[in-house]
């Protein structure tokens, strides 16, 4: 029996901030109190007033394994994740081969069991032709179903409306969607090709993958969810206009339709393309400053429920291609929490709201068993944050396999001090512990 005591922490949990201690026994939070006797523990960590929060649950990552492991893999990206305070991830199905059968899903679960540094689950991918396989999927086998309604890889674009309605009608799991209208994007792209040929500037990206493309697809998905009664979660909302589609007059537990925003859409705007170029090429695109402000407003007033990363690494060589050849996506799990803590210190968002959007709400939305909170009896997924420990992102401290970050050169004033995964001190003061104690997510459904 191992007991670790975290003393003198500023605990941020369930809309409260208070001074206290947390006692961990093996994998579980045993006790939370104002002053716990140090003699109860084998190891005592004096937090010295640092912030103690639940581990971040990132509901949208692409760790590239299997098949795309020159960009990243479950081992490398989960190491970066725990260094960034992410203790649990939900990975997406557009790997190679794609996660569109139950056998493929279980193969990825096995890879994670053998190599991940963080708790894990995966999305099961829907296609135009795997409805029967999806029907066989146990509702507790994984986090949910992912549908690409735009910007797919391989054959994962679900563009058959009859099939789409059948998928929405035949699962009670959360259906998470990438919403961009392919027809609108193709039309826009042809217009820019006619003007620029193969030398389209990166600044055209948010005009090609436009507000109209996003809104048309999101609104269609929402109408279909309302028609079928499906549980819909719209990934990476990128426009202020889309935020009007979501409601904040009922608690998350009662919502059938929810939304997510990602770090890059809250940090960057189209003005950053000049400096960052294709390094900030994402789908959906980073758009205007007005869109960014609209997303912040919706996050803070609870029309947007979850804050995630959409971590999607590519090699620097791949990203430095011209616009048409450069892939979309970038690495973010190591730097999202420090970036958002910067926004907290700017007065943009409270710590309590950050914890709600990054820890509590993913646990609620996906019915994750005993994670996402600092509660007695819950798994001890915990993060200690020093709000006064400045550091600069550089090649020497980037842990992504791809070796670069869109935040490279940025100085953050806050740092992750310690990360616990199921009670195991997985990361401490810049070092990842080679030992692992991780679990496949279970669900209360």
Image (cartoon, rainbow, N blue to C red):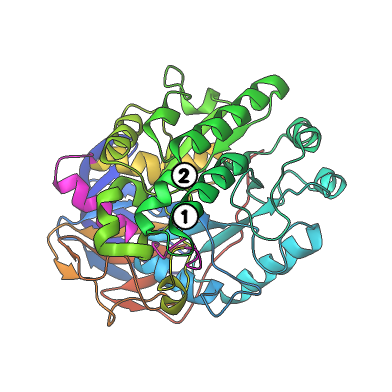
What secondary structure is marked by label 1? loop
Q: Is 8 positioned to the left or the right of 186 in the image?
A: left
- Res. 36 in view: no
Q: Could you tell me which secondary element the residue under label 2 belongs to?
A: loop
Which residue in the structure is indicated by mark 1?
310
Q: Is residue 168 visible?
A: yes
Q: Nearer the viewer, residue 238 or 122?
A: 238
Q: Is residue 348 magenta?
A: yes
Quadrant of the image occupied by residue 301: top left
132 or 367, which is in the foreground? 132
Q: Quarter-wise, where is residue 316 in the image?
A: bottom left
Residue located 73% across and 61% down the image:
105
The residue located at (26%, 47%) in the rendering is 11
Magenta part of the protein: which range?
A: 324-350
Magenta-span inclusion, residue 48: no
**Label ID, residue 216:** none
Quadrant of residue 276 within the rendered picture: bottom left
* Residue drawn 25% across the image and 74% down it: 429
Residue at numbered disc 2: 236
> Does the magenta stretch mainly form a helix, a strand or a loop?
loop
Q: CA distance from mark 2 to mark 1?
A: 8 Å
Question: Could you tell me if the residues under marks 2 and 1 are in contact, i.e. CB atoms within 8 Å?
Answer: yes
Q: Residue furthest front?
A: 194
């Amino acid at each position: 029996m191992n007991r670790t005591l975290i003393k003198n922490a500023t605990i941020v949990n369930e809309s409260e901030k208070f001074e206290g201690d947390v006692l961990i026994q093996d994998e579980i939070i045993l006790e939370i109190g104002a002053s716990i006797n140090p003699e109860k523990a084998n190891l005592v960590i004096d937090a010295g007033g640092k912030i103690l929060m639940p581990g971040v649950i990132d509901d949208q990552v692409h760790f590239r394994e299997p098949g795309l492991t020159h960009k990243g893999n479950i081992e490398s990206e989960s190491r970066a994740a725990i260094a960034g305070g992410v203790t649990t991830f939900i990975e997406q199905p557009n790997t190679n081969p794609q996660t569109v059968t139950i056998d493929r899903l279980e193969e990825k679960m096995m890879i994670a069991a053998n190599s991940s540094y963080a708790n894990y689950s995966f999305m099961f991918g829907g296609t135009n032709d795997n409805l029967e396989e999806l029907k066989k999927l146990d509702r507790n086998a994984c986090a949910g179903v992912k549908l690409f309604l735009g910007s797919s890889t391989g054959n994962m674009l679900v563009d058959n409306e009859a099939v789409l309605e059948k998928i929405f009608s035949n699962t009670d799991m959360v259906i998470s969607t990438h919403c961009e209208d392919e027809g609108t994007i193709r039309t826009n792209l042809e217009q820019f090709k006619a003007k620029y040929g193969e030398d389209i500037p990166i600044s055209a990206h948010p005009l090609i993958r436009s507000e109209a493309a996003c809104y048309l697809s999101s609104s269609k998905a929402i109408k279909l969810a309302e028609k079928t009664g499906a549980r819909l979660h719209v990934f990476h909302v990128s426009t202020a206009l889309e935020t009007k589609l979501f409601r904040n007059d009922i608690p998350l537990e009662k919502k059938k339709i929810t939304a997510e925003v990602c770090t890059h859409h809250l940090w960057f705007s189209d003005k950053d393309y000049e400096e960052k170029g294709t390094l900030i090429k994402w789908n959906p695109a980073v758009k205007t400053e007005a869109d960014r402000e609209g997303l912040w407003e919706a996050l803070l007033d609870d029309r947007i429920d979850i804050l995630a990363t959409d971590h999607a690494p590519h090699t620097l060589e791949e990203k430095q291609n011209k616009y048409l050849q450069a892939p979309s996506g970038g690495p973010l799990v190591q730097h999202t929490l420090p970036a958002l803590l910067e926004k907290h210190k700017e007065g943009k968002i409270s710590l309590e709201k950050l914890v709600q959007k990054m820890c509590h709400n993913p646990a609620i939305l996906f019915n994750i068993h005993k994670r996402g909170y600092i509660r007695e009896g819950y798994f001890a997924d915990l993060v200690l944050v020093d709000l006064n420990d400045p550091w600069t992102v550089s090649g020497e401290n980037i842990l992504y396999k791809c070796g670069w970050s869109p935040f490279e050169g940025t100085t953050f004033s806050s740092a992750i001090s310690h990360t616990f995964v199921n009670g195991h001190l997985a990361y401490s003061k810049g070092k990842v512990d080679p030992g692992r104690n991780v679990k496949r997510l279970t669900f209360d459904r």
